[in-house]
């Protein structure tokens, strides 16, 4: 009987020790495990992400940001998503000016927020949102995460999701990839 109680205790301990982010929990995501991943470092060496090794990945940088773009190009666009993650220089405050600018950009692109929240991500203040609209004549969803890293830097990421099938699943898959991030500074 003690062995059964010990095994149950270990099982509960393992289940309770999830690395799932607050955003993943809020979105009711089940953690996704990817096999055969490779660690990608952004050009300016500010962060790393673990990306499936068969995905196409591109790096971009300029004086203000360093980005990783990645997607599973083997699948149809309506079955996968495009993930972009960037480390940005600049001050960020989640104040009324921030939300006014965000709302203006969304309005110009005919996108409507369907869900949003303030959670921590990697122990840092974060605002996230999901939008829906049309892009290139396709139904389009976008999951965006913006995290304040320091007074002069922030991290942003988004998933572009085309079509209307498995939206939540694809958002959760992208959250799982983002949960692998390691900030290097």
Image (cartoon, rainbow, N blue to C red):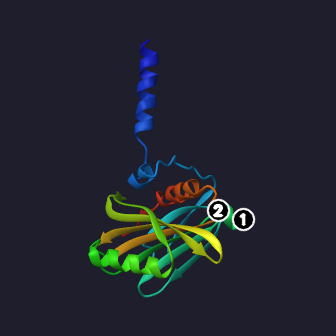
**Quadrant of the rendering where the C terminus is positioned:** bottom left
State whether residue 175 is above or below residue 58: above
Badge 2 vs badge 1, beta-carbon distance below 8 Å = yes
Q: Residue furthest bottom?
A: 63
Residue 98 placement, left or right of 115: left
Residue 125 spot, x, y in % from top left: 31, 63
**40 over 109 or under it: above or below:** above
Crowd class of label 1 (few under 14; some 14 to 19; many from 20; radius 10 Å): few
Figure quadrant of the N terminus: top left
Q: Is residue 151 at all visible to an observer of this figure?
A: no
Q: Position of residue 34 (x, y in %)?
A: 60, 53
Label 2 sits on a secondary structure element that is loop
Say which residue label 1 marks: 76
| Residue at (43, 80) in percent of width and height | 105
Q: Quadrant of residue 75?
A: bottom right
Residue 17 visible from this viewpoint: yes
In which quadrant of the rendered view does residue 107 lie? bottom left
The residue wearing badge 2 is 80
């Amino acid at each position: 009987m003690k062995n059964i109680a010990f095994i149950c205790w270990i099982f509960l301990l393992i289940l309770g020790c999830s690395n799932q982010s607050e955003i993943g929990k809020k979105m009711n995501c089940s953690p996704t495990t990817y096999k055969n991943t490779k660690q990608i470092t952004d050009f300016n060496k500010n962060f790393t992400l673990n990306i499936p090794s068969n995905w196409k990945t591109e790096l971009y940088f300029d004086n203000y940001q360093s980005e990783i773009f990645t997607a599973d190009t083997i699948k149809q666009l309506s079955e996968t998503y495009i993930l972009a993650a960037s480390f940005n220089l600049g001050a960020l405050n989640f104040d009324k000016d921030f939300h006014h600018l965000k709302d203006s950009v969304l309005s110009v692109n005919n996108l409507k927020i369907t869900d949003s929240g303030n959670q921590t991500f990697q122990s840092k203040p974060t605002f996230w949102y999901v939008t829906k609209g049309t892009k290139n004549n396709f139904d389009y969803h976008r999951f965006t995460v913006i995290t304040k890293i320091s007074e002069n830097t922030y991290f942003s990421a988004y998933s572009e999701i085309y079509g209307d099938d498995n939206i939540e699943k694809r958002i959760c898959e992208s959250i799982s990839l983002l949960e692998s991030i390691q900030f290097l500074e």
